[in-house]
Amino acid sequence: MALLEIESVLLTEEEIAARVRELGEQITQDYKHLAVEVGEAPNILAVGVLKGVVPFYADLCRSIKLPLAFDFISVSSYGQATSSSGTVRILKDLDVPLENYHVLMIEDIIDTGLTLAYLKEYILRRNPRSFKIAALLDKPDRREVPIAADYNGFVIPDAFVVGYGLDCKECCRNLPHIAVVREV
Ligand code: IMP
């Protein structure tokens, strides 16, 4: 059975928390002119891409000091052949129509960019009032399609990372830090 070895800690819990707070402050500044009053139906929709985004989503949304509505989408790549064409399968669709919302899509990591490029087109077809992307991690060296986040936590090297939501075969999602791993 393949086991994982933690090679190094790339980002500590404290570094992640500090950067997520900064992103939340920046997003709060950028969106505050759009926000409704507390108590009204929120017009900003935080769309999380399950499952790896869960810790980042929870921390980022709590750092955004504006009324937010929550929704989630879950996707799965078809596999090597089709993932290179950017085809993904929607496992759980959004619950709400998007016409009334400023959509902030929140993703854990941008690797090849294929998933995000697909989701961006998918969401834009539903005519949101605006659309932006927040991603915790970016591996630009791996990019196959030109897509970038509007809000990016950390640019990281081309290495496989786990923790803070990110997994390797479902392992390590609940680590509080982000680590580089290799199979042994
Ligand atoms: P992309 O379509 O290649 O950009 O893939 C994005 C998805 O691949 C992410 O949402 C993750 O689920 C997964 N992924 C990419 N790199 C890593 C990594 O280093 N660790 C864990 N998951 C990763």
Image (spheres, grey):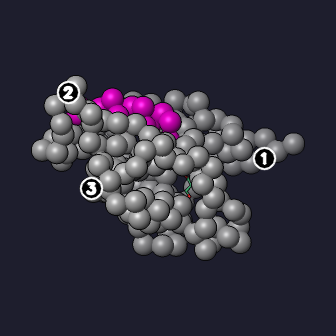
Secondary structure category for the residue under label 3: loop
Quadrant assignment, res 4: top right
Q: Position of residue 114 (x, y in %)?
A: 53, 66
Q: Position of residue 157 (x, y in %)?
A: 49, 58
Label 2 packing within 10 angstroms: few (<14), some (14-19), many (20+):
few
Q: Is mark 2 within 8 Å of ligand 1?
A: no
Confirm or deny contact between disc 3 and disc 1 (CB under 8 A). Answer: no
| Cα gap from disc 2 to disc 1, whole angstroms | 51 Å
Q: Which residue is mark 2?
A: 38
Q: Position of residue 46 (x, y in %)?
A: 37, 42
Label 1 packing within 10 angstroms: few (<14), some (14-19), many (20+):
few
Q: Which numbered circle lies on residue 3? A: none
Q: Which numbered circle lies on residue 129? A: 3
Closer to viewer: mark 2 or mark 1: 2
How many labels were placed on the picture?
Answer: 3
Main SS, magenta region, reads helix
Q: Is residue 179 something that shows in the picture? A: no
Amino acid type for the residue under numbered disc 2:
Val
Please tell me whether residue 146 is drawn above or below residue 178 in the rendered image.
below
Mark 2 or mark 1: whose residue is earlier in sequence: 2
Confirm or deny contact between disc 2 and disc 1 (CB under 8 A). Answer: no
Query: Does the magenta segment cover residue 56?
Result: yes
Q: Is residue 153 something that shows in the picture? A: yes
Q: Which residue is mark 1?
A: 184
Q: Is residue 37 left or right of residue 71?
A: left
Q: Is mark 3 within 8 Å of ligand 1?
A: no
Which span of residues is magenta-colored?
Answer: 53-66
Amino acid type for the residue under numbered disc 1:
Val
Query: Does the magenta segment cover residue 21?
Result: no
Q: Nearer the viewer, residue 71 or 55?
A: 71
Ligand 1: give its quadrant: bottom right
